[in-house]
Structures are given as structure tokens and as C-alpha cells.
Image (tube, grey):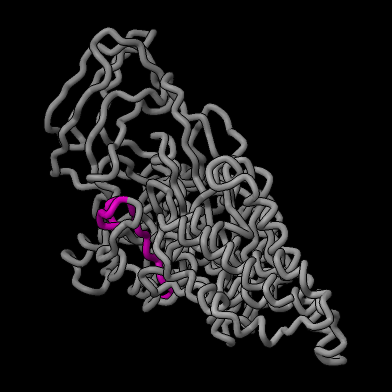
Amino acid sequence: MSEEKGTIIKVSGPLVVASGMKHAKMYEVVNVSDQRLVGEVIELNGDEASIQVYEETGGIGPGEPVYLTGQTLSVELGPGLLESIYDGIQRPLALIEKASGSFIGRGISVPGIDRKKKWEFKPTVANGDTVGEGDVLGEVQETTLISHKIMVPADIGGKISEIHSGEKTVEDVVAVIEGDDGHKHKITMLQKWPIRIPRKDAGKRVPREPLITGTRILDTLFPLSKGGAGCIPGPFGAGKTVTQQTVAKYCDAQVIVYVGCGERGNEMTDVLMEFPELKDPNTGEPLMKRTVLIANTSNMPVAAREASVYTGITIAEYYRDMGYNVALMADSTSRWAEAMREMSGRLEEMPGEEGYPAYLGSRTAGFYERAGAVECLGSDDRVGSLTVIGAVSPPGGDLSEPVTQNTLRVTKVFWGLDANLARRRHFPAINWLTSYSLYDENVSAHWTKDVAEDSMSLRNDAMRLLQEESKLEEIVRLVGMDALSPKERLILETAKSIREDFLFQNAFDPVDAYTSLKKQYWMLKCIMAIYYAGQDVVDNEEFDFNALKKLSVMEKIVKVKDIKDGKWDYFEKLEKEVQTAIRSLK
């Protein structure tokens, strides 16, 4: 039987229109021209189909063929995903380099997962066992950090009639499941899943466990739950990429999926060069052993940006379904939205606000709502989570633009970057007055139980002082410091210490880059001791603020971030020292 095909009648950048496509289906993958460029049907009108092509279309013209494949755009799922670096449609960059050199050639087709590599498959079920979709058939030690669970594919169930152990490739049959209708399903370690359809789960849970990032302003003031969704909007140069990379390096998620979607090539190069060299602070192993990187930079085909975020989140859902805590970083969703805007314009659709398509809001919501803490399919009560953190790059830092506003509607954490803080070299440049987290109550039980009973009240007091400082600074600018009462001056002194000694954090300092929750608590407690002890003495007419600044313990607070974890007796001693020194100023 001959391969079904249509004929190109129009080419407009990444958009190709073909006739003779009456058998095509929406979102079907097609091969454009005899160069076999990868494309996807995004609009059908009679026997004409509009196709977005994920490769450069230069040199393609009317009259050339378009071949139908009958398949939707899917990702390959199985052992071998971790430590891989892919482009936006899951082609391994290492294999592409071997095939075409440093620049990606057109029409290259390489499998997403190595077909020749053998994995040691260890069954966890036996012949005669009854299994359903999502049940674990066996395990493969994918890396030293992650045991890869081989699960029953969706919509398959029945009795195990064959189970094979030993070294297998991803295409070898590891199990045969006989369904109730007598049909025998041959199961391999390789699965495929359409990227635009969320993977199934048994139900969502309320996310109550914090994602520990080691960044003090994030963990203490604006926490994100495992299974939550957050965004990092900010202007150029404010530190979005560094913040996301820091979270990817140090957070306690078990699997990291990092999607470089339309960002500058040199930034993604830093990631690709740095991640393989980094050690995971939680395990001491190389960070890449729990990481999947997807690189689709600004100089790569624009249409593939739109696919790259879906490719990344489908891979992330796959590991979530194994019962792992997964974190996905998308840098940046603005470039993804711009790709949608370009394709929408070429399709001549009615534009929405600022030229973005009318469906921008629903697409944004559909992406972020794939995050969540879930009960996984299967009979073993696995629980997994997928946390999504998206960077947003609003033009000129304008947070009222459509991408930022649509993102804020569906995410519960807003880490707002401030260009003024970045210019003052205060990093991370997250504005503590405009940022917020709606997961405070969710994670409060974890802080109270695992860190300290007074941790949330301490955090709330610190937030209050920072807000009061902002109001008092206005007064100082208008009428000077002398107009403030002693208690108000104490607020300013304490808030300054919170900003400079607690919120400021050097992402490139080996000691300061990561701070455990308990150390964050003790650092803040030592700083807040200035305020708590000072309240008892500031009303004294002879109280000297200059003497307060010259106290030797104030110098110790400045250096408290250099104290290593575990030296809790030092922090306890310092807190008492601060209280004694300030009360002695009476």
C-alpha cells in the first residue's frame, strides 16, 4: 500500500499549507517534502491542512509532497531519559551532532531513547499475578540515584502469562499480559505518550510538603509546595535564569526536568556545560544523574518552542507516575507564548490582547494545571508530585502584559524580580513587598513539626517588619530620621539586617548558595533577637542607636551565614549574646 501524501500549496516561514490532506487528523505528525522535515497538523479546512514545521523551511516550495504518518506528536518514555540532552521534539543532541556536526541538519530522525543499550530488568511480579494500568512490573537501575519503574501502559490489564528478567533492550518483551478478552499484550520497557494529553492519575492531593530550595527568601518567606505551580516574572538582567538554575541545582526534588524554551543560546550553553560538572548537594552524586535537559534556544526553529514545554512536562509526568517528586523548570514561557503568537499570525487568526492568540489563557492554564501532588495509578499506593516553575520575561518588565497576567491567574506562587534590586546588586532580586505565596498554610505544619514550633510566627514577624520598613522609609525621605520614634528606628535597624544578612544570598558561594531549613530558622531567629530584645530598652531616654550598631554581636550576625549546618549550639549562644548585649544598653 502506497504512503498517503498531500501537496504543498503555500509556505510561510514555519507554516506550511498542503492540499490533498482529507485523511489527515488534528495534531497528526507529518513529514514535509522529500527532506522529511518534522511537522504537525494544527488546522484542517476541507482537504487543506495547515502544518507547523519544527525545522527550518528554507528551500521548500509549492508542489512538494507532505507524507502522513497516522501518529500524533509523542515522546518516548523508558530507561535512558535521565542524563540526556534533547531538542524541543526529543531528538538527542549528542546523536544529532554525530549525524550532522555542530549545527543541526534538516530531516534528521534519531530515536529519543537508545535502542541498543541493555538494562538489567528485575521483575516485581510473577506469572499468574493480576495487574492493571499503572502497576509496576519490575525495576531497572537507570542511574545510581533513580530506580526506573516499568509500569503497565494505560488501558491494559489482565493476568501475567510471561515475565522475563535479565539484560534487555527497551524494545525487548519483558512481560506478556493476557486480557479478559484473551488478547495477549506484549509489554516492552519503551512506551509512547502524546505530549498534549496529560498522563492519567488516580486523583490529586492537597500539596502540603514544601519544595526545599535552599534559597532563604523562597523557603522562608514565599514557600512552594511539592506539586505546586509558581512563576518568576522579571525584566531583562534581573536574574530569572540564575534563580531557576539555583533551584534546579539545590531543590530536594528527586528528578529535575529543565526546559530551555527560546532563551539565549549562551545561557543554555552555561546550563549544558555546568550541570554535568555539578554535584547534587543532597546525595553527592553528579547532578545530571537525576536531570533531563531540553534545549530549544532562540536561534532554533520557533515552532519547536511550543512543543518543547509539552515534551518536558510529559517526561516529568512519567517520573511522577513512578512515585517520585519531580520539578520542571521552564525558561521562559514568554518565548513559548511568542511562538504561539507567531503561528497564530501566520494562520491569520483573530488576534487577542497585544497580538497574542485568544486561546493564550487556556493554553497557559492547561500547562500549569498539569502540576500537582497525585495518587499514582496502580495497586501499591504510590504518591508522586510534579512541581512547575515557569520564568516569564515581560517586555520592559511590564507585569500587566498578557503572558504574566494569564500566568498569575493559574499559579499560586509569585516570585517577582525587581530591576532596582538587581541594579543595587541585591540577589536574588526578588521583591519581598510584591511577591506572595498561597501555600503558606499548606506548609506551616511541616515547618512547625520538623523545624521549630515558633518558625511561622518568626517568619510572620519578619514579613511585618519588612512591610513597616517600606512605610517608614517614605517618612525618612520626606522629613528625615529624627522624625521617627525609637521603636520605629529599631524596626529600620532590624529590617536592614533581615535584608542584608538574611535575604541577600550569593548563588556562586559554595557555603552561602544553599541553606537548610533549620539554619534558615536560626539565622532569622538571631536577627529577630535584635528587635525582640530592643523593644525592652528603646523607650529609655539614654538609649544610643550608634552604640547598638557598634556592638560586637552585630558583626557576628553579619557573618552568621558562614556558619556551617549542625552548629546549632553556636546559634543558640549567639541569640542569647544578642539579647544580653542589647539589654545592656539600658
Kindly identify the residue that appears in the image at 70 percent across and 66 percent down: 533
Instruction: Please tell me which residue lies in front, 340 or 367.
Output: 367
Kindly identify the residue that appears in the image at 50 percent across and 72 percent down: 505
> In this rendering, does residue 17 appear at all?
no
- The answer to whether 450 is drawn above or below residue 216 in the figure is above
Q: Which picture quadrant has residue 471?
A: bottom right
- Measuring from the top left, give residue 203's x and y in whole percent: 57, 29
- The answer to whether 322 is drawn above or below residue 226 in the figure is above
Residue segment shown in magenta: 283-299
- Measuring from the top left, give residue 476's x and y in whole percent: 81, 87
- Measuring from the top left, give residue 48's x and y in whole percent: 52, 54
Question: Position of 196 compared to 475: left or right?
Answer: left
Quadrant where the N terminus is found in the figure? top left
> In this rendering, does residue 567 appear at all?
yes
Question: Position of 506 compared to 210: left or right?
Answer: left
- Measuring from the top left, give residue 85's x and y in whole percent: 30, 59
Kindly identify the residue that appears in the image at 38 percent across and 68 percent down: 511
- The answer to whether 80 is drawn above or below residue 90 in the figure is above
Kindly identify the residue that appears in the image at 39 percent across and 74 percent down: 508
Q: Which picture quadrant has residue 334?
A: bottom right
